[in-house]
Image (cartoon, rainbow, N blue to C red):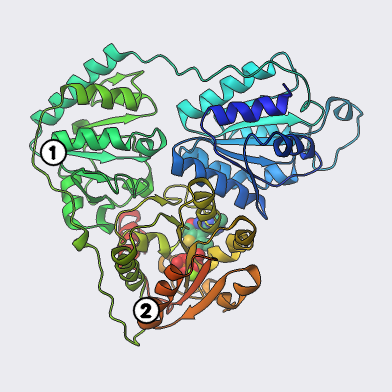
Amino acid sequence: MLLAEALFTALKDRGAREVFGIPGDFALPYFKILEDSKVLPLYTMSHEPGVGFAADAAGRFNSCLGVAAVTYGAGALNMVNPVAQAYVEKSPLVVISGAPGKLESQRGLGLHHQVKRIDSQYKIFEEITCAQIVLDDAKTAPKLIAEALDTCIEQSRPVYIEFPRDMVAEEVDPVPPYQPTTEDMDAARACAEEVLEHLRAAKQPCIMAGVEIRRFGLEDKLAELTSMLGIPVVTSFMARGILADADSPLIGTYLGLAGTEDVRQTVEGSDGLLMLGVILCDTNFGVSKREIDMRASVHAFDREVTFAHHTYPNVPLGALIEAMIEIAKPLGKAEKLAPSSYPRNLPRDDSPISPTNVASAVNDMFSRHGKMPIASDMGDCLFTAMDIENTALVAPGYYASMGPGVPAGLGIQATSGKRPIIMVGDGAFQMTGWELGNCRQYGWNPIVLLFNNKSWEMLRTFQPGPDYHDLDDWGFAKMAEPMGGHGVRVTTKAELVDALESACQDETRFHLIEIMLDRGEISQTLNRFVNAVKRLSGVK
Ligand code: S1T
Ligand code: MG
């Protein structure tokens, strides 16, 4: 089989469902084989950041490999930021970059798209991926591909595959099938016993679920375990959206001082906090009122389980949860947070809109039409999402780059067929909102909630005063029709409610609802978050 076809077949066999990409002359040969082989569908985007964000979102949403295919230099380096975000947020993203062939690399000429040296791009990607390979030898390529893709799955982090254009049609053996690393179930069982003993001995045990639960497809297993134990479950900020439909005693998302007081006290007052797949980062724990007592906590992450003074070195999260389910006994009678605790019943009147009103309108829409998955960008839209009833959410909750909102929503719809809600600020929409122009050709029809405060408002909240936070009024709604969608600008609650209902009724195209917000009008969650950050970091 041709090397390129072997690569795409291996990706499909390991769960990838599509490829997002933009070709270039160094990539055309492998794009042609992708098209001819029909192993995986290709969705082209308009700018490589959009390729990276869409592919990352598809992988996160399905807990499987996301695939981003680009050309050498201008293409791949354009995608460094989304790959970096995928790395720190533990997303299994496969980056495939075309590259110069052997002969042209040896002519001694500087090549177009090349930086300092032929391998400069490889070195840049070494910093933001967990494995890197160059497919320059037909004999070793199948094994290299297998190792790289298996590492991507097991570490749930991006890998980099450099594909010289003179290699794509080389005859090769098929890529060996996925070989999961053997799990030491004895160690997992010993660890599970110690974890459950720790929870039994605690007066206020609590479980915090992190992103690895989603990345390794463990939501059902976690729901089974937590409903057996009956102790309160929270998600980290980054993991908001997991367990949304599970029968699990989920009481909310931990946001420290920025979140609800009962969740904060349940977590910070716990003498037996079990963190499953949680990234210890500032956005998850940066606004804690009381430092989490790590001596009283157990942290399972990156295939290790750490107690106060010792670590089990090779216990993958899935093995630990499996082993805990085998011996779990009820430890409490915690109840799932009732949907009624979210803001809802927005009045249809002519008063102005606040971010929290947007959450109410969406919750009301969910009650009428059912929940939808959400892709959120960075900005107050993400903090507003915390007031929306728990549903599948893809968002940059740690690396916090702007730009993923629209492309991630398209990635969700491409990979799942589900109509998403996209929440994005005007500043972030200026960056990647134009990817909406690709909806018509692929039949995508997201409902886009554009928070237009004509401002980099989140920055203004940190630093009131400078004019450089002011953005011009671009009139985004008017741009929707020419791109194949429907756009409407809303300034009152009644207009917002009606625009959402019209969007739900019209599934033929994307709906861009440009929600006008006053500068200074921010969500209660963002307000608490910024005040807490200022207070805890000593910033005036
Ligand atoms: N550039 C990129 C790619 N990502 C970023 N996170 C930033 C810059 C810094 C930054 C924020 S929040 C923010 C910026 C520029 C303003 C966002 O404006 P908008 O999308 O309109 O949303 P809102 O008005 O709700 O703030 C974070 C703190 O780093
Ligand atoms: Mg804004």
How crowded pointer 2 is (Cα within 10 Å; few <14, some 14-19, many 20+) is rated as many
In the rendered image, which residue does mark 1 sit on?
230
Who is closer to the viewer here, 60 or 414? 414
Residue, x 62% and y 37% (percent of image)? 40
In the rendered image, which residue does mark 2 sit on?
353
Residue 318 placement (x, y as % from top left): 33, 26
Who is closer to the viewer here, 106 or 531? 106
Question: Given the image, on which type of amino acid does mark 2 rest?
Answer: Ile
Question: Given the image, on which type of amino acid does mark 1 rest?
Answer: Gly
Could you tell me which quadrant the N terminus lies in? top right
How crowded pointer 1 is (Cα within 10 Å; few <14, some 14-19, many 20+) is rated as many
Query: Residue 141: which quarter of the image?
Result: top right
Label 2 element class: loop
Residue 173 placement (x, y as % from top left): 68, 15
Whether residue 460 is visible, yes or no, is no
Q: Specify the label residue 463 is tagged with.
A: none
**Does residue 491 appear to the left or right of 168 in the view shown?**
left
Q: Is residue 140 above or below residue 135?
A: above
Whether residue 119 is visible, yes or no, is yes
